[in-house]
Image (spheres, grey):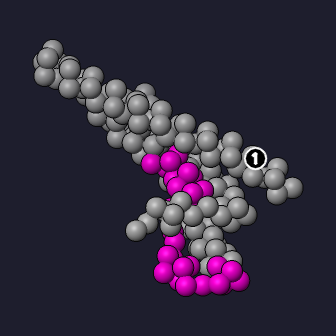
Amino acid sequence: MRSLYLSIEKWTTTFSMFVACFMLFVAASLGMLQIFTRFVLEVPIEWTEVLIRFSLIWMVFMGIPMAFRQGAMVSVDVLYRWSGPRMKKVLDTAVALAALTLVCIIIWWGWDYANRGKVQSMIGLEDVSMFWAYMALPVGACFSVISIIGNWLDPQRLELETAQ
């Protein structure tokens, strides 16, 4: 059961990281388009700035699961280094519970915020609801839940290995 969960977690975390990388590509491409149209053609496109902003928000929230999975988000480095194996498991559990609590709050209020944003439209893209921009919070948080549990089941300490 554990290995099945970890394989599903690996797939979902990889997918969320792919989406985050794609959103970075979208933001960079739109930024270059905005610079070209504004300074070369001298006809700025107003909707690019809005899409850059929201693609960066999606990038962050879809990239967070990979940070959780690698153990790079919330850590107690000094206590972890000084602790024995039993205390390390207690610290891992405490950090996982704290992170899950925060992420569950983000899911709850993010979903509420997205639903409230259904009546708003994006500036420059009046046909697109703000719901799609705000959905980055609950969607990214749901992927984070999977990654947090995956890191609790199979801890990775990549930031401790590279720390000096």
**Residue at (48%, 32%) from the top-left corner?**
22
Q: Quadrant of residue 108?
A: bottom right
Residue identifier under label 1? 7
Mark 1 belongs to which amino acid? Ser
How many neighbours does mark 1 have within 10 angstroms: few (below 14), some (14-19), or many (20 or more)? Answer: few
Q: Residue furthest right?
A: 1
**Residue at (75%, 47%) from the top-left corner?**
7
**Quarter placement of the N terminus:** bottom right
Q: Nearer the viewer, residue 109 or 22?
A: 22
Q: How many marks?
A: 1
Report the span colored magenta.
Answer: 60-88
Percent x, y of residue 24: 41, 36
Q: Is residue 139 above or below residue 18?
A: below
Q: Magenta residues: mostly which secondary structure?
A: helix
Percent x, y of residue 12: 66, 44
Instruction: Give yes or no for residue 63 being in the magenta stretch.
Output: yes
Q: Nearer the viewer, residue 155 or 112?
A: 155
**Quarter placement of the C terminus:** bottom left
Q: Is residue 46 above or below residue 102?
A: above
**Residue at (55%, 85%) from the top-left corner?**
82
Residue 120 in view: no
Q: Residue furthest top?
A: 41
Percent x, y of residue 124: 31, 30
**Residue at (16%, 23%) from the top-left corner?**
38
Please state if 25 lies on the left or on the right of 15 as rendered.
left
